[in-house]
Amino acid sequence: MNAPDLGKIVGGPKVPRVDHVLIAEMVEAGSRVLDVGCGDGELLQLLSERKGVDGRGVELQRDKVNACVAHGLSVIQGDADRDLDNYPDQAFDYAILSLTIQATRQPKNVLENLLRIGRRAIVSFPNFGHWQVRTKLLFSGRMPVNDNLPDQWYLTPNAHLCTIRDFADLCELVHANVEQAVAFNAYGARLPIKWSLSMQNMFGEKAVFLLRGPGLPPANR
Amino acid sequence: MTGASPNLAPVSRRHPQVDTPSSPVVHFDASAPLRLACQQDLAPFSIAYETYGELNAAKSNAILICHALTADQYVASRHPITGKPGWWDNMVGPGKPIDTNRFFVICSNVVGGCMGSTGPASINPKTGAPYGLTFPVITVGDMVEAQARLIDYLGVDQLFAVIGGSMGGMQVLEWASRYKDRVFAAVPIATAAWHSSQNIAFHEVGRQAVMADPEWSGGNYYAAGTVPKNGLAVARMAAHITYLSEEALHRKFGRNLQDRSSLSFSFNAEFQVESYLRHQGSTFVDRFDANSYLYITRALDYFDMREGAGGVLANAFRGTKTRFCVVSFTSDWLYPTRESREIVQALNAVAANVSFVEIESDKGHDAFLLEEPTFFATIRGFLNAAATKRGLGAAEARK
């Protein structure tokens, strides 16, 4: 077996992902954070450097977990669908799911768990309502393949793609309070907050939602 | 406690390492008995140990390594009987993942063992004869209590880390549960929070093999001047299979024949795998006491962290501040990943700081003793990060 090239997976100066930068802005300094689907630990590193958080991660892919732990991050090999049930209520200030919800088997369950485990949940996802996705489907009649959705339909881990509108509906269904919702265009620029949900849904390539679980008071700070 | 070894006449067929180990040994006299789980007191008792590296002025850089069933305190030094390098020589040493330039490493022989810590082969001072089967049944918890005495003796208040694989991992879990303030970081490797029915079954086969050997003499072979070599060797052979994997056996031996080109229609060790197992069995009996094997396997069978925790494993760790790194190996069927995951789930349930990696390896349970680059990188990375948190100087951290 070849060891993963740890240097390639984590570390080295990197430009942080735009959604990560936004998440880092949302998170209070010194808070307790669980990053579900933490991948190579990029967001945990960023949160630890910029906000001094006490961060934990869950990641499905073994080589990524090993790389994270080898770089000193507290990460477990696990599955958002299976392993969140064990965490106690409000064990974290923030439970984060970054570009992962679309790859879970039971997104509603996962979201409910996030809202239970964290005093706040932060969820980012690729928006399937983006105009390029719509035009691709409309004119070519094929599933879109682009930087945001890089895999062919038969290779993609994404099982539950949704639009910003769909996600807002799910939040309502599970009685989550949307404290903040930000969409990014294809160039990584934030769309104006004042834009309507339809406009965000049309021009947002990715979205980040800051959510508060049902029954939790609005003021966390 | 005293610094000198008890001056007793050597009893035949017992290895001198039992009474006078090559390593340092601390003796706890009758005024400081070890209260065992079976409610008996063990006194006096001795703990033989090795240390590597230097304890810093703040006494904050001590790592306790807990050994597995048949290992001993010689984690990174030459074994006094076999002359082989330490059993974790690749992991522990200057510049190695458990870096003795940086950490003060302690490893002690478990109580019940036969390399200088008090065990069934030791002389019972009340009778002047070896304990044999009059030695009290010990538990993994008892091993940890004995180690805690040693750690007190060495003047260490909080261990920076407790690390161990297999039975060593069980001791790590007991340490983290019993001494929450004394363990900064814990690394249980290839282990479980309770011994499975299958594992008890394998141990029973081993014990029955020892007891079926007439040379065992009801456990009094020391007086009889015999050694139940055949029984102990069979026990070791059976156990050794559980430490490997089918894939590793196949890769190493396949159906290859030993020193011959065709079958000889006999019961000689015709296959390489037979020859290998016989070798494992016969070398083992030279360094290990058969009664120690019975007692330590029993301690493992009794191991269940849920007991004393109201049947819920998570309760054993409630309130823990320790940083955990749980490690399992894909091909380990003795302590499979599933059992490590149960530990992780219990730790998550109390919101503990836990990392968990499953290392891909086809080498079975023994993988934890072997050079596995990803495993080594994991241990090194985890310890570096924990050392930084503990204020042990990140600058010294090696890549």
Image (cartoon, rainbow, N blue to C red):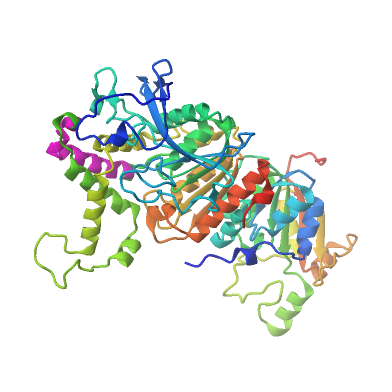
Task: Point out the image quarter for the C terminus of chain B.
Answer: bottom right
Is residue B41 or residue A159 the one in the foreground? B41
Judge whether residue A105 can be spotted in this image. Answer: no
Q: Residue at x 54, y 60 (%)?
A: A62
Q: Main secondary structure of the magenta part?
A: helix
Q: Is residue A16 magenta?
A: no
Most extreme residue toward the bottom is: A140
* In this view, B378 is above or below B182: below
Judge whether residue B273 can be spotted in this image. Answer: yes
Q: Is residue B212 magenta?
A: yes
Q: Residue at x 39, y 43 (%)?
A: B68
Is residue A191 or residue B302 the one in the foreground? B302
Q: Quadrant of residue A140?
A: bottom right
Is residue B384 or residue A141 the one in the foreground? B384
Task: Point out the image quarter for the N terminus of chain B.
Answer: top left
Residue B373: x and y in percent read 50, 60
Residue A168: x and y in percent read 76, 57
Q: Is residue B309 left or right of residue A98?
A: left
Q: How many numbered discs sit on the rendered protein?
A: 0
Q: Residue at x 21, y 59 (%)?
A: B275
Residue A138: x and y in percent read 73, 80
Q: Residue at x 28, y 65 (%)?
A: B253
Q: Quadrant of residue B57?
A: top right
Most extreme residue toward the top is: B31
* In this view, A153 is above or below B252: below
Which residues lie in the magenta part? B199-221
Residue A191: x and y in percent read 86, 65
